[in-house]
Image (cartoon, grey):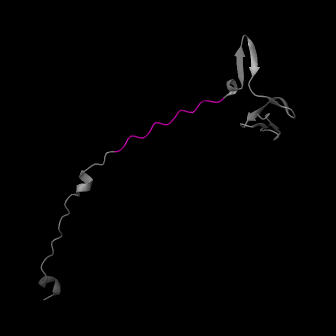
Amino acid sequence: MSKKAEEPAKETPKEAPKEAKEEKVEKTAKPEKKKKKEKGVFTLYQIENDKIIRLRPTCERCGPGYFMADQGDRYTCGHCGFTRYKPAEK
């Protein structure tokens, strides 16, 4: 006789459905993202009494058309790198 015939047939226990699968985890709602302000040319100008007012200075080296970025304590040109510091407030 062979060994296979002597051994009782092993039954593979069927896996019971896992409780974790049945129990669904509730997802928390994601916080809403803040909508970014759209930047454009209209942020560089202000219209007042049919006159256009530039809100930022133009670069002294590059000329008109190149606005300087407001960095808090200074203005910086993104084109040439020229920096002009704001007067200190007392």
Total numbered badges shown on the rendered structure: 0
Dividing the picture into quadrants, the one containing residue 13 is bottom left
Q: State which region is magenta.
A: 27-39
Q: In x, y percent, where is residue 32?
A: 46, 36
Q: Residue furthest top?
A: 49
Q: In x, y percent, where is residue 44?
A: 71, 26
Q: Residue furthest bottom?
A: 1
Q: In x, y percent, where is residue 28?
A: 37, 43
Q: In x, y percent, where is residue 90?
A: 76, 33
Whether residue 29 is in magenta: the answer is yes
Secondary structure mostly taken by the magenta-highlighted segment of the chain: loop
Decide if residue 19 is on the left or right side of residue 7: right
Which residue is at a point 16% across and 83% down the rendered structure image?
4
Of 32 and 70, nearer the camera is 70
Dividing the picture into quadrants, the one containing residue 27 is top left
Which residue is at a point 53% across and 32% down the rendered structure image?
35
Q: Is residue 90 above or below residue 47?
A: below
**Quarter containing the N terminus:** bottom left
Of 1 and 62, nearer the camera is 62
Q: Is residue 19 above or below residue 66?
A: below
Q: Residue furthest right?
A: 61
